[in-house]
Image (cartoon, rainbow, N blue to C red):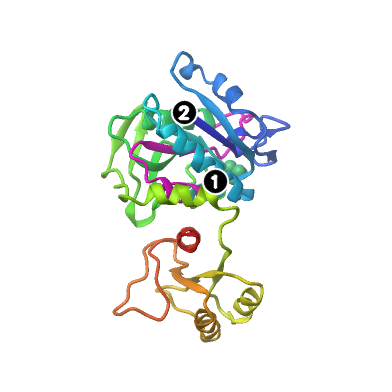
Amino acid sequence: MVLATGGTIAGTAASAGDNVGYSAAQIGIEQLLARIPALQGLPVLAEQVAQIDSKDMDWDVWRALAQRCAHWLAQDSVQGIVITHGTDTLEETAYFLQQVLAPAKPVVLTCAMRPATALLADGPQNIVDALAVAAWPGAQGVVAVCAGVVHAADDVAKVHPYRLDAFGSGDAGPLGHVEEGRLRLLRNWPVAPVNTAPSAIENIAKAQQLPRVEIVLNHAGASGAMVRDLVAGGVRGIVVAGTGNGTLHQGLEAALLAAQAGGVALLLASRCANGSIVRHAAGPIRMHARSAVKARIDLQLELLA
Ligand code: SIN
């Protein structure tokens, strides 16, 4: 089952030579799949869940996508799901779906860095590779496939604004490679957390919005002003991306601790691209092992529950 959400993979430019001056989310999924000769005659169904540039990803699309995934995953005839998605927030959607679905079948997000009209568009091959992973015996959990590389939802991050191989898995490294339709697995499939998914999908079906959680970054000259503004605006949670091993400017830290004392939930991540915070003892702010954008999803789901 292919679920489409838009992105550059469905984008169009005025000329075939233009890889950057295009509009994302223009071509429907049926049309995109019909252009790929390798898929003709295969038992592949498609559904257009949304048609957006993923920079505009929002709760309505996430909720609809999670619900459509849950629906199709429950069908015995469905072996796996491929989701076409923009690259910009792909890592957030992948992590969100892993947290709420924890699927025993594969859910494979794929994308493109060049629009569908490009001279050498990367989208068709990425779709073919993603379908190969979704159909692979034993495949499970939410993963991303781009430029022949398979990344686990927990680890995947967009690491380059332009090149075709735009994603990385940090210290963990990729899960595997797709080579001429075959998967070469480098490590085990991510293990799905047990018993989290049913309540999570029920909670999100009922929610009109996710609780408001914002991300604040520590940096030279950081102060507590932004935190105080967020608290005054009614924020429910703040994820702070600390410098290095989770360090915070003293002014920012004081404002965060005051917010926490007033009932705002906090999580501390590192703004470093690799690794996670290592501590001798627990500090005053709970730590999160993943990136700030993924920590934000966990805090939102926690507050929702
Ligand atoms: C998007 O994220 O929807 C646009 C950018 C891309 O897909 O590369």
Residue 187: x and y, percent?
26, 45
Residue 213: x and y, percent?
56, 65
Q: Nearer the viewer, residue 49 or 177?
A: 49
Q: Give the residue at x 57% y 66%.
A: 214
Alpha carbon distance from label 2 to label 1: 18 Å
Q: Nearer the viewer, residue 194 or 19?
A: 194
Give the mark toward the camera: 2 or 1: 1
Q: Residue 91 shows which numbered tag?
A: none
Q: Name which of mark 2 and mark 1 comes first in the sequence.
A: 2
Q: Nearer the viewer, residue 187 or 159?
A: 187
Q: Give the residue at x 69% y 38%.
A: 22
Magenta-drawn stretch contains 107 = yes
Residue at which label 2 appears: 1
Q: In this orientation, does residue 61 appear?
A: yes
Q: Quadrant of residue 210?
A: bottom right
Q: Residue 63 shows which numbered tag?
A: 1
Q: Amino acid at mark 1?
A: Arg
- Badge 2, how many Cα within 10 Å: few under 14, some, many 20+? many
- Determine whether, in the image, residue 4 is placed left or right of residue 232: left
Q: Is residue 204 above or below residue 119?
A: below
Residue 38: x and y, percent?
46, 18
**Picture quarter with ligand 1:** top right
Magenta-drawn stretch contains 175 = no
Ligand 1 within 8 Å of the CB at mark 1 = no
Q: Could you tell me which secondary element the residue under label 1 belongs to?
A: helix
The reply to whether callout 2 and callout 1 are in contact (CB within 8 Å) is no
Q: Which residues are magenta?
A: 92-121
- Badge 1, how many Cα within 10 Å: few under 14, some, many 20+? many
Q: Is residue 286 above or below residue 91?
A: below
Q: Amino acid at mark 2?
A: Met
Q: Is residue 9 above or below residue 302?
A: above
